[in-house]
Each structure stands twice: as C-alpha cells, then as structure tokens.
Amino acid sequence: MTERLYYRDAYQREFAAAVLSCQPAGDRWEVVLDRTAFYPEGGGQNPDTGTLGQARVLDTQERGDQVVHTTDRPLEPGAQVAGRIDWPQRFSRMQHHTGEHLLSGTLHRLYGVDNVGFHMGHDAVTLDLSAELDAAQLERAEQLVNEAIWQDLPVRAWWPEPEELDRLEYRSKRKLTGAVRIVQAAGVDSCACCGTHVSSTGQVGMVKILHFQRYKGGVRLWILCGDRALADYRRKNADIYRLSELFSAKPQELAPAAQRLLEEQEHLKQQLAAAQRQLWALRAAGIPEGTPLALSFEEGLDPAQLRRLCLAFCERAGLAAVFSGGPQGWKYAVGSAQRDVRELGKRLNQRFAGRGGGQKELVQGTLAASRRELEAFFREEAGE
C-alpha cells in the first residue's frame, strides 16, 4: 500500500521514499514506492510528473492500493529515492480543480444544474452541465465566483466521520459508500472529491469562461483559471493590439473595422467574379463554333472558377477541359453540352490516379500528370 502524501499536504513538493518494486514496461519502467507526493490520474485531474532521483516520472496511475510511477529509467528496489513533483504544473491543476468546484457549486446553487463531466485539457478545462444555460446566466455565475475568489475564503479537504458526513450537504456525481473525502469552500461549495486543491479561494486567481456551446442536452463550458487565464489574457491582449495597428483602429473599434473589411472584401470578390465572367465570355467567343475540343491550362484558379470557365467553353466546343496547377497536381473541370462526361471522368481518373466526379454535363477533381499526357488523352477523346 502506498502512503499518499498529497492528501496530508497538497503543497508538499519534495519527499523521500523507499522503492518497493521496479518492473519493465516496454521502454519504460513502473515504479512503486512506500510513499509518494505524486498525484495519480483521477477525478478529471491529470497525473503528476516530475523526478525520482535521476529518473523522469512520465505518468502516475493508481492501481488498487498502490500508486504506480512510470519512469524513463529503472530504480533499484530497496533503495531510498528523492522525489520532486513538477510544482508549477501541479499548482496550476490545483487552481483549476478548485476553480471548477467554485463554478460548478455556484451554477448548481443558482440554477439547479449538475456537473456531469470535467476534464483538464491542453487548451482549457471543459465542464459539462446537465441543462442549457444562456450567456447572461453564465456571466452572472462567473461574477459571483470571482467575488468569492476576491474574498479569499478558506478551502478545506477532509474525510468526515460517518455521523458528520450524514449531516453534510454535498455534491456528488454518484452514490458513495465508505469513506468520503469532502472538499469545501466556505459558503460557496461542498463536493465529494479525490483531487488536490488550493487552501483558499484567493489562490485560484480568477475563473474565466472562455466559450460555451450546447452539448448532449446540456451545455459544455471551456474555462481557464489562475496562471493559464493570465497567459491567455496576455496572448489575446497582444493579438488585439497587433490587430489594432493593422486595422488602424482603437481596440474597442476592432469589430466594426473587421465588419467593414469583410464587406469590402465581398464587394471586391463580386467585382472580380463579374470581371472574370466577362473575360471568359470573350475567351469563349474566340473559340470557333463547333470546335471539337477546347483545352486550357490556367494558373491559380479555384474549383468554382474552373467550373465557370469550363462551362463558358462548353457553349462553343463539343468538349471542354480546364486545368489549374502543375504536373505534381492539377485541379480539373471537364464538361460538355453534347455528351455525358461522367464515363470520361472515370477514365481520366483511372489513367492519372485522379479523384473526382460530378454530373453528366460537368465533372471535377484532381489528378497528377504531365501537360503532354493530358493533351494526348483529350485529343484522343475528341477524336482529333
């Protein structure tokens, strides 16, 4: 059985322990100690990493009454070893786990919703709620949570005796039996939890809801707390002022400036499309009526532009094929107003390892071939 030092003191960063066992696991080793401050993955909280002597701890998992440390090198059974957890990482997770409790408890108190899912991800913590909430409701909860943080209320984690537990009101995702660990933030939340937490709400720093969306009949929130919330603010603040320079607009005027730019861009796209249609109509008019094949190799056309140019050529030629790209990869459009080109498209793809399809009057896709090979293929198809 491994003694769990993180329950006695979540702030313990270093410890000494005896190596009980060390077993190979692929190119790693699984180490069991008589005592540890490394928190194993569980309750939505990620596992601690750090060092045991010269070995790097890459993962920490709970197996029965033991805590198993995955290391990058072996340790000698029976030896004494110095352990050190990655404290900045652990403290950040303590901030986020406690912040999640504060937010979940506040949302439950205000709106009766339950936390049905919690995960500490790479970009943010996700929190799944049992019912839908709107932006105003979430903003109200966020405000109250941060006011509780500013009050620096005590956070207590303990195993109540059965009689005391029976008198407590606390949140839990499921019915619990036996010893139950309670984490309580005075006046804000009381919850059954096995994770590590800060000792007062002020150490959470802040709780920020980044985003939310409907999810499985409820709502999913993305939140950040403490150090990661500050880092996120710094990145976004830098981006805002960079955009402010690019748009020549004050930060608070960026949204209208971006809207104007989008409208101008759409107007220019429409003008370009109109100019292209005129150009392609002129090019098509230069093709003699009844020409068997109109074959063209262009630069920088997207699939929609290829389609429009090909259809313009189809009005004058029995078969039209337009390509954009190069020998390493062409986008194509093949069409005809006189024949079904779907079978032709299949032969084209088979010959040149292409992909694509379409309707009887026009097919589109991609392929790889030389220009000479394509010219020969279509001359044969057009009977030239």
Image (cartoon, rainbow, N blue to C red):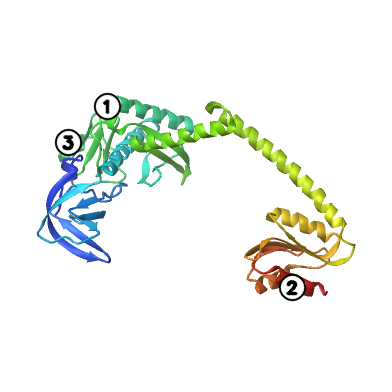
At label 1, the amino acid type is Asp
Viewed as shown, does residue 349 lie left or right of 284? left
User: Is residue 61 in sight in this rendering?
Assistant: no
Identify the residue position indicated by label 1 in the image.
Answer: 152
Q: Residue at x 51, y 34 (%)?
A: 242
Of residue 91 and residue 374, the one placed in the foreground of this image is 374
The number of numbered badges drawn on the structure is: 3
Residue type of the residue flagged with mark 2: Phe
Secondary element under disc 3, as helix, strand or loop, is helix
User: x and y percent of residue 235 in the render?
Assistant: 44, 37
Nearest-to-viewer mark from 1 and 3 = 1
User: Horizontal and vertical percent for residue 372?
Assistant: 72, 71
Query: Which label's residue is closer to the chain start, 3 or 2?
Result: 3
Describe the element under mark 2 as helix, strand or loop.
helix
Q: Position of residue 177 (x, y in %)?
A: 21, 47
Instruction: Say which quarter of the image contains residue 161.
Output: top left
Sequence order check, earlier mark of 1 and 3: 1
Q: Earlier in the sequence, mark 1 or mark 2?
A: 1
Residues tagged 1 and 3 counted as in contact (Cβ below 8 A)? no
Q: Nearer the viewer, mark 3 or mark 2?
A: 2
| Foreground pick, 177 / 361 | 361
The amino acid type, in three-letter code, at marker 3 is Glu
Residue under label 2, please give it. Answer: 377
Q: Which residue is mark 3?
A: 164
